[in-house]
Image: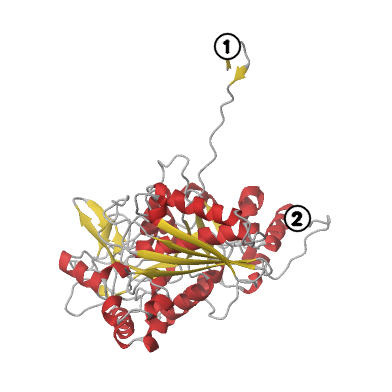
Amino acid sequence: MFLADQRIEIDARPAPPVPPVLEVVMLGHCPGPDDGSGASGAQWQRVADDEALLADIAALGFSREVRRLKALRAGVDSAGRSVTPEPGDADLRALYRLPLPIHALGQFRVLFPYSFDTPCRAVSTLAGDRAWLPRAVQDFFEDSTSLGREALKLWVIRVPEAEGAHGFLPDTGAQLTDIGRLGAFERALLPPRAGLIVLPDLERLQVPALLPDIPRMQLDNPVPAFLPVGTAVDDGHRERRRGDEIPHATEPLPPEAVIEPLIRTLARLRPDMQCLLALPLDADAGQEVPVPAPAWTAYLTRTVGSALKEGAASLDAASALRHLQWIYPYLRGADRPLGSPCGLVAGLQALTAQRAGPWRSIGERPFAGRDLPWPVLDQNQAAALRQAPGVTVLLRRNGRIVVDDERLCVPCLPLPALRQLDAARRGQDHWYSAEVMRFMGWLQRQLRALGERLVFDADVHDPRTEMALRAFFTHLHARGALRGARPEDAYRLAIRSDGDSTLIADIEIAPAFPLDLIRITFLQDRHNADARVQMEALDG
């Protein structure tokens, strides 16, 4: 298209996509048929042919795996020699423990086309025989179809079913520098922009195999008759002759075996991340429907209560619980069995962070999807769970699913700040806001990325570091994340030097809600090529 005398030319091009604000990592099972190659239904050839996807995987430190995938696809290595089998080829073809960036549900279906319909090894009466990860991925992208340029990013890590629940749990002594020896959970900590972890199939394995559903009307068994092979006759209303008809029944893990490895690993390796976890179910003799597992609620209430009352000795064990956000109840639809609520919650959190900012809560924002919360809770039950042990509760209001409050079970404060408060101040409600924890984690990731870009400019006389920090917090104030009439009222910044190689920035910000003040110490070490962020929240 030309204008005037052809001296001006309009060359229309699509705008580049907006980078994701909050990336999410999901770990789970993707069952598929055994075709003899060890891939178990995974379309690893499509991964090997996608250069953009391989570049994202290699950026996390999996260059060797990327080269091996290309060699397996081509049949020859980089030197032109025929590929010889190696011990890890079967797991690589199955894409086990390999972080895969997913931008749409269709992309996941292409990579794991059999995952929605193939039965799992572990079966339970209530959770069914299908994996929960595919459904959680579908829920995650449920409300993101109208985003336009604002694309969400989800990292999916396939965990081998044979490893059971232990395949989701981390090694508490692992180091992120040794990529080859990391388990699935530790690899979920590698994406630098990721802020949430979701474990839907760990939740499925925590549902007792013989936990009954709502009792259905019992009908007389039909008269024996010859039927064609494959005819389904079990409609759920008939009498079961044995209680051991469910194969591969496994006992759920106790709460301390799941909670302690998760929170210790997150606190040590990625203090900026959170893990969404559904509160397990169990039977209650006085109820027709399952209830939150008493062993889990008692463990959380005991741990949190001792930390708030007894003080220093118990704070170390309880403060790391701020990295877990508990969700309840589960989701269930007319044509879909029980499923995890965490995929839907993580999707709305990522979407809200993309549209309104990571400091915004998802409270009272309607969820997409057709499923409903199950078991259904009334207001009194929801309020009781929200208070103790501290659960984010899904409710149905006016035909929509909403969360009235994002809740943590312990204060969102780091351990040094928590030690400075007495028992009365630790129990104040505003410390338990999950969106504040998410905002503080996002701040740590943004400042760490800024420090890595300026790691060789650690000079107190060089104004670039201060200018970059002031520009960052001024932009936050303009977007409404910080309160104050002017940027000067929203944050304070002081630059100092500790020797020749370390630059320290003392920052105080006033978030819009619900805390009074967040104090940040930004350390930039030129000799060690390192940037660190220390944070504490203050009241008053």
- Between 259 and 268, the one nearer to me in the picture: 268
- The type of residue carrying mark 2 is Gly
Residue 422: x and y in percent read: 31, 81
Colour scheme employed for the rendering of this structure: secondary structure
Q: Is residue 110 visible?
A: yes
Point out the tag, 1 or 2, that comes first from the N-terminus.
Answer: 1
Mark 1: few/some/many CA within 10 Å (<14, 14-19, 20+): few
- Between 126 and 478, the one nearer to me in the picture: 478
How many numbered discs sit on the rendered protein? 2
Residue 210: x and y in percent read: 32, 76
Residue 267: x and y in percent read: 48, 74
Q: Which quarter of the figure has residue 198?
A: bottom left
Q: Separation of disc 1 and disc 2 at Cα?
A: 57 Å
Mark 1: secondary structure: loop
Residue bearing mark 2: 75
Q: Which quarter of the figure has residue 277?
A: bottom left
View extreme (top): residue? 5
Residue 325: x and y in percent read: 36, 68
Q: Is residue 156 visible?
A: no
- Front: mark 1 or 2: 1
Q: Is residue 414 left or right of residue 402?
A: right
* Quadrant in which the C terminus is drawn: bottom left
View extreme (front): residue? 461
- Between 425 and 85, the one nearer to me in the picture: 425
Residue bearing mark 1: 4
The residue shown at (77%, 60%) is 83
